[in-house]
Amino acid sequence: MEAGISFTNDIIPILRVFDVQKLKEFYVDFLGFNVDWQHQIEENSPLYMQVSQQNCILHLSEHHGDASPGSTIRIKVQQILTLHQNLLAKNYKYARPGLEETPWGTTEITVHDPFGNKLIFYEGN
């Protein structure tokens, strides 16, 4: 590694999405992310959006070629039991996630967005 180069842990995944209403229903209403900004070149062009919750930032894109549907990301959280209770309390029609204790020492919640992407929230290791 060349001297002076430093990598951070600030990684922002880009997930492919197809429907603005469904993405807001899932990411904002269900998961509780905030819309930070969104961009479209013109009214009927693909949307590019940033959502966040505390230090977790995601980019969501309708642009072909930005990402492939069916991606999986892992998001480390604290207080996963509280997150689980909050998600179940929302009574979201399309997801009733469970809790999984893994052999590698994590507790995990897996949810799938309406576009085939998998988000794994985990606590531990």
Image (cartoon, grey):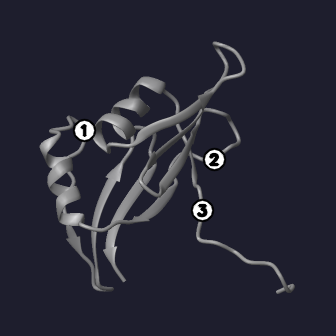
* Type of the residue with mark 3: Ile
Query: Residue 94: x percent and y percent?
Result: 25, 38
SS for tag 2?
loop
Quadrant where the image shows the N terminus: bottom right
Alpha carbons under labels 1 and 3: distance apart: 28 Å
1 or 3: tag closer to the N-terminus: 3
Q: Is the residue marked by circle 2 packed among few (<14), some (14-19), or many (20+) residues within 10 Å?
A: some
Query: Residue 21: x percent and y percent?
Result: 41, 24
3 or 2: tag closer to the N-terminus: 3
SS for tag 3?
loop
Left/right placement of residue 13 relative to residue 23 reads right
Q: Is the residue marked by circle 3 packed among few (<14), some (14-19), or many (20+) residues within 10 Å?
A: few
* Type of the residue with mark 1: Tyr
Disc marking residue 10? none
Disc marking residue 94? 1
Question: Label 2 belongs to which residue?
Answer: 67
Vertical comparison of 9 with 33: above or below: below
Question: Label 3 belongs to which residue?
Answer: 11
